[in-house]
Image (cartoon, rainbow, N blue to C red):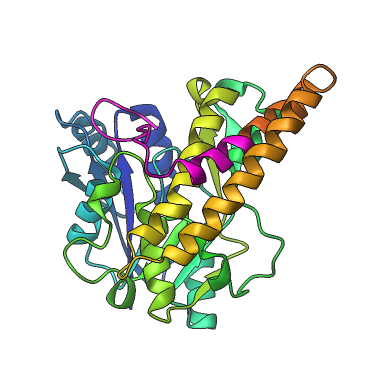
Amino acid sequence: MASVSIVIPTLNRPKALARALTSARAQTGVDDLDIEILVVDNSADGNARAGVAAIAAAPGHAIHYVSAPVPGVANARNAGVAAATGDWIAFLDDDEEAAPDWLASHVATARRTGAAAVFGPVGAEAEDDRPIGPLAPYFSRSLDLPDGADVTGRAAYLGTNNSMFERATCLAGDRPFDTSMNEIGGEDTLLLKRLVEEGKRFAWSARGGVTEWVPERRLNWAYVRKRKFLSGQIRVLTHWKAQPVEWTRIAFWMAAGSIQTVLHGIAALVLAPIDPVRAEVARVKMNGGLGKLLWLRSRPALYGSGLVS
């Protein structure tokens, strides 16, 4: 019987965690799988322990609590991998809710394609029935591709949120996620880049969807611009962290960032008085370009001590 470990890193989000855990336990079509769920509590004070224990006491798949008290997104993922026993490791963020057939769809896609890792769609909804409007695309992942399609070439646009990896080929070693990315994220982008260079193949699990629930504090253009700036930095930083350093790719992305900054900056100024939403979209793209240009600058933290992404 194949075994799957569902890893849910969490930091100071009890309500969201309970929803994610409940959805992980409610998976259907998995009778042929041995499933364990690991909650990695990245808080210094272990504040998720009691809530996890309460849910774990109810019947269902085994839930294990893992403490990773040094905050950092890579620390949390590494702790989950180290504690997992499954042949496959599926990642579900604590602000995500998995569809009932999420895991079964991932496993079916992996078996059919032989891919080393699979990735599924992410839809976005706002917490507390708030409207999400034009911000939805920035918290979503949607590819117009059939189930099982090869997405290896799109690795830079994927991430560990809603993913499943073959442990032996993808997550070997003590620290597969680079801890220098603890506060800014991008540890998954760096991992995927390395796996592609090693010849691993990724597949699209079109039916393995999750919903990301966006809290009010993130429903603003300032937060989206900050994330986009970081995304631009990470696009270049992954080439700097390569061995040897990929200076040609760095130069390419910095040049692209220059063009994006100028063109979208002009568009933002022109659109501001006539179409505020399109102007904000242009500002977001401009920030992505700026991130590529200023990739060596100190990076704004989205994760880590005292922060909630």
Residue 273, compared with residue 196, is above or below; it is above
Q: Nearer the viewer, residue 192 or 64?
A: 192
Q: Which percent across, then down, holds residue 190? A: 37, 60
Q: Which percent across, then down, holds residue 27? A: 46, 55
Left or right of 77, for residue 120:
right
Q: Nearer the viewer, residue 105 or 269?
A: 269
User: Is residue 78 highlighted in magenta?
Assistant: no
Q: Main secondary structure of the magenta part?
A: loop
Task: Work out which quarter of the rendered image holds the N terminus and state it.
Answer: bottom left
Q: Which percent across, then down, holds residue 125? A: 60, 34
- Which residue lies most toward the right here? 274
Residue found 39% across the figure and 50% down from its top: 186
User: Is residue 290 highlighted in magenta?
Assistant: yes
Q: Which percent across, then down, holds residue 168? A: 28, 77
Q: Nearer the viewer, residue 55 or 113?
A: 113
Q: Nearer the viewer, residue 123 or 198?
A: 198
User: Which contiguous range is marked in magenta?
Assistant: 285-309
Residue found 25% across the figure and 34% down from its top: 54
Question: Can the viewer see residue 97 in this picture?
Answer: no
